[in-house]
Structure formats: structure tokens, C-alpha cells
Amino acid sequence: MSKPEAALHAQSLDIASLQTAYREGRLTPLDVVGEVLRRTADDPNCVWITRLSDAAVRRYAQALAGRDPASLPLYGIPFAIKDNIDLAGVPTTAACREFAYTPQASAFVVQRLIDAGAIPIGKTNLDQFATGLNGTRSPWGACRNAFNPDYISGGSSSGSAVAVAKGYVSFSLGTDTAGSGRVPAAFNNLIGHKPTLGWLSTTGVVPACRSLDTVSVFALTADDAEAVTSVAAAFDADDCFARKLEGHGFDFGSARRFRVGVPPSEQLAFFGNDEAKRLFGEAIARIESLGGEVVEVDLQPFLDTAKLLYDGPWVAERYAAIREFFDGNPAAPLPVIREIIGGARRWSAADAYTFGYRLKAAKRQCDAIWQRIDCVLTPTAGTIYTIAEMLADPIRLNANLGTYTNFMNLLDYAATAVPVGFQSDGLPFGVTLFSCAHQDGPLLRLAARMQRALGAQLGATGLPMPGAFANPLLPSGQVRVAVCGAHMSGLPLNTQLTSRAARLVADVMSAPEYRLVALPGGPPFRPGMIRVGEGGGSVQMEVWEMPAREFGSFVAGIPAPLGIGVVKLADGSSVQGFVCEAFGADGAEDITGYGGWRAYLAAR
């Protein structure tokens, strides 16, 4: 084997590594798909339902010829698609041969990824009709764990997770109704991101529970998951459940200090797995080392909510999704799927309303937690089972796997599964970070920090580690404003910031180009900053961050001669901040020499 061939065989398929190789001219998309086709020539783990032909894969790669790698965010990035999501011209089976159809068009989210330069490799195995969390419920065979083939891979997005873990693709799409985008990530040492409901279109997706479904993303790193999510998340007017992206506000994932909820030990179930219990304890310690203030939270309301999913009428939504097929082909579904979906007929419309009211009340109770914390940390699953164990007791063991996942979509939360280590038997263990809707960006950035910390602890792991967050890809919805006077911490007008949910970001100095004057009038007494060509100095300031929706009312309350403009900081950057019109200096005391308003007040 030549050195170039050996290098290609060893090439990591994480997005950052491929993008670097493309920019430097060391690889082309044809090189990469050739290696992918080599790696996927055999399928001992039962990953694929349909792998595209070599010629079809190469056509996607050839379509990128002549394009600048920097011109497309996912240029030449291979990916896999769960086989309940449409890819034009390729059968969609939902793991049921009798149900299969060949779509004319790709799912909305798949087309966005292809348009961004990503290359589809194939359709992956799943628990039939996306019903299950274990990966054994498929006529194409039980999808086997990437680290030990005797163990389950997790489901229902089993093949999508194993395809990434085995190095067949850079990322994959799953779906998540009850944990299907998170449990397989935990069992295969991956990031599994379950976006805010409605962020990723479900047009072209075979529904499980349409009101709760979301397309999910599996990736090697949280940075990769954010990159994919930022491309895939676009409002689809044809999807009646679609939502526009909203800003996340305070970026706890990048903050030096943040508050993380952790359930008390008596509410945690590891089903006899002491290794999982140990690793979860280590994950708590790791998140504390990153600046997390651990706050004990009552998980019981969430666990009670989770029971509504399968012990309530939402299971009837699974029946509604395939009702015509299910009634017309009663023998087609696997027995366990037939038992679960067929049982939905007992629920009435009145039951749906009754349980809907219960869910509303449960959400109100659970949402109260966000007044005290930024996110919650739980195990993703308390333990893992062998395939033989799962087949012997499919309903009970599958229910165990959903302990920490089943409530998430019912409550409209975003969640990221994060790998945090290995049991002594070599099987991975993962945790989940979750928060309220639209907190995807902070969750993924905190996940990236946890991955970096684990990499530093273990030394060289061979896995790419996430980078810094200089250019976050998901919107913050925040505006930063620099204040230099009565709005600073502890001063009379600071409540005009805090009452608008603003948070202090940093203490800074302006560039040495400003006169500071004490304006007449008051109380409250105020300074004014005036940018000058000569004779200026640096002024002490605070940078605050507030929701953009609050910014207009804040600015409207600022009296002349003050206003909001662009303030240059000592490090050369610029930020929105308080400035003063030149006429405001007329007759005002020049206090530039004090270096800031606090120093002036102290001297007085």
C-alpha cells in the first residue's frame, strides 16, 4: 500500500478534517467517496437498507467538480439518511418491505444538505416505523453496536448512528420522537443532537408521532453537529409544524459560569449498571470543572410526563401515521410493532383531550425549572443490553432505555447527547444535556467543551476535538451594549438592563480616543463619552447582553444628548454602546483623567 493510500485509509471523516484537506488540495470529493465505498463494501453490522450504487455516489461527487471548497458549507461531506426520510429515486421503506415507495423528490432537509455540497451514501437501518429505542426491530437484521456486535446499537435510528461510528460517513440523519436521536449516540460514542421541534422540516419524513417528531443529527463532534444543524434548519412553509429559528439568549455553553441541574441520586436509575453510575458521576465532576454550578433538581415531574407517551393516546398518533397501510396489511409489521401500534385503537378522542390537559399542566410544572438553571444533565440511558437480552424481553427493556428521553419532545425541549467515557468492558457511555426550546447553540457548545475536556483527560484519542466558538453558527438573538455610567452594575439605572433580562458579559476599556464629561442635571447623574481626534483617553465600561426584542424599548428611553452608537474598544473591536453628541460637552466638566465614571464618583 502506498503512503497516499494509507493516509486515505486512516483519514478521519469529521467535517473539519475533510474541509482542511479539501482547502489544501490533498483530497477531492472523488477521493473521499472512493474511500467510503471501500469501507462500506461489507456490512456485518447491518447498517444499510439501501447503499447507493458506486456510480450514483460518484455522480454526486463529480457534481462538485470545479467548485471552490469554500463556496459550500458541506462541500464533499459524505452522509447517511435514516430510511424513513426520502432521498429522490431511492426507496423509502421505514424498515417494512410492503410499505416501500420510491419518492420523486428528496425530503426538504436532505435537499438542503445536498445543495450545501453534502454527498448521500445510502439509507440506513432502523426499528420498523421508527418504533423502538434498541435497533433490533428490523427485517434487515438487528443493527449491531459499533464497539461490540453482541450488543444493541440503540434505536430507532440504529443504522444512522453506527454508520458514523464505523467511519462510513461524516454525519447522518436520524429521527427522534422518544429518544431515537440520542440513545444510539450514547451506545456508539457519538454526539446526537435532537433539535428544537420544528427547526428541521419533516416534509418527506415518514411520521411516527407527527406532532412530536424531529429530524436529528449524529456526528463525531459537537462542532460538526452544529455545522449540519445550521444548514439543515430552515423554515419550510409546507410543513405545518415548522418554526422559525429564534435566538437562544444567554450562551451558557460558552460562559465561564453557568447553572446545571442534576437529579438527586435516588431519582437516577442505572438498572444495576455500576459502571454507568460511575461514569455519570465523573461527567458531573467534569461539567463542574468547566464552570458549571450544580443545582439539584427534582426529576420526578419529567419522569411522570414521560409515561404519557406510551401510556397515553400519543401512541394513537403512530397508528394515525400509517393507518391505511396498517389496516390493509395487518401481517406486514413485525409482531412487536403490531402489538404497540395496534394497541392504539383503544384510545378515544376524549382521551386525547384529557391527556392533552395533563400535558399542559405537566409542562407548566416542569418549565418552572428554567427560572433556576440553564440546562439539565442526565444519563442518556441508564444501561445497555445485549441483543439476546433485548430479544428475550423487548417491551420492558426498551422502556428502560427511554427513562431519560421519553419526556423531551412532549415538553418541547432541545437536547444533545454527549459521549463521556467507556465502561471497563469497552462499551461507550453518554450523558444528555437538555434545555428549553431554541437553546440548541448553547447545548452544542457546552457539549463541545465536554468533549475537549474528555480528550484532555484521556490524552490523544484519535478523535478530532472541537475548536473555539469564534463564529457561532446558530443565532443568539442577543444584542450587546457597552455602558459607561449610571447603567453599570450597582448604579442607579442598572435595573433598566436587568429588568430586560440583560446579563453582564465583560468589563472592558474603550480605545484611548474618548473624552468623558460629567453631564449637568440629575439625579441620576450621568457621564457622556465623546470620540475625539486628540486629547482622549480610555474609559472603563461594562458590556451587557440583552434579548434583541428588548433593545428597542431600552434605546427609546435614552435622553439627549446621549444615544447608542458604535464604541471602539481597547482591543480594536467595536460594540454598540453609549455615546454623547458633541454639544453635550458644552459647559460640562471634563473628567477624562479619572479613566471612568466609578473612579470619578469615588473621588467626589
Image (spheres, helix red, strand yellow):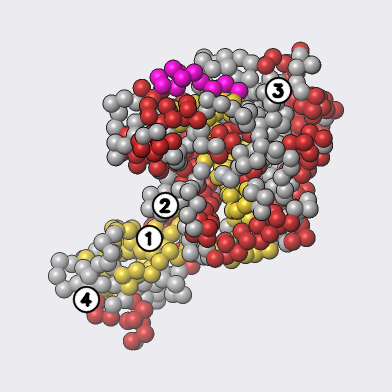
Q: Nearer the viewer, residue 254 or 423?
A: 423
Decide if residue 352 is on the left or right side of residue 517: right
The alpha-carbon separation of the residues under discs 3 and 1 comes to: 58 Å
Task: Name the image quarter holding residue 76.
Answer: top left
Q: Residues within 10 Å of mark 2 (few under 14, many from 20)?
A: some
Tag in front: 3 or 1: 3
Tag in front: 2 or 4: 2
SS state under label 2: loop
Tag in front: 2 or 3: 3
Quadrant showing the N terminus: top left
Q: Position of residue 527 (x, y in %)?
A: 31, 73
Return the mark for residue 139.
Answer: 3
Residue at (21%, 68%) from the top-left corner? Answer: 513
The alpha-carbon separation of the residues under discs 1 and 2 comes to: 27 Å
Task: Name the image quarter holding residue 45.
Answer: top right
Please name the amino acid that badge 2 sits on. Answer: Gly
Return the mark for residue 467.
Answer: 2
Q: Earlier in the sequence, mark 4 or mark 1?
A: 1
Q: Is residue 92 visible?
A: yes
Q: Earlier in the sequence, mark 1 or mark 2?
A: 2
User: What residue occupies the far front of the structure in this picture?
Assistant: 1
What segment carries the magenta color? 49-59
> In this rendering, is residue 257 above or below 598?
above
The alpha-carbon separation of the residues under discs 4 and 1 comes to: 27 Å
Is 67 colored magenta in this rendering?
no
Q: Position of residue 340 (x, y in %)?
A: 79, 29
Q: Which residue is mark 4?
A: 587
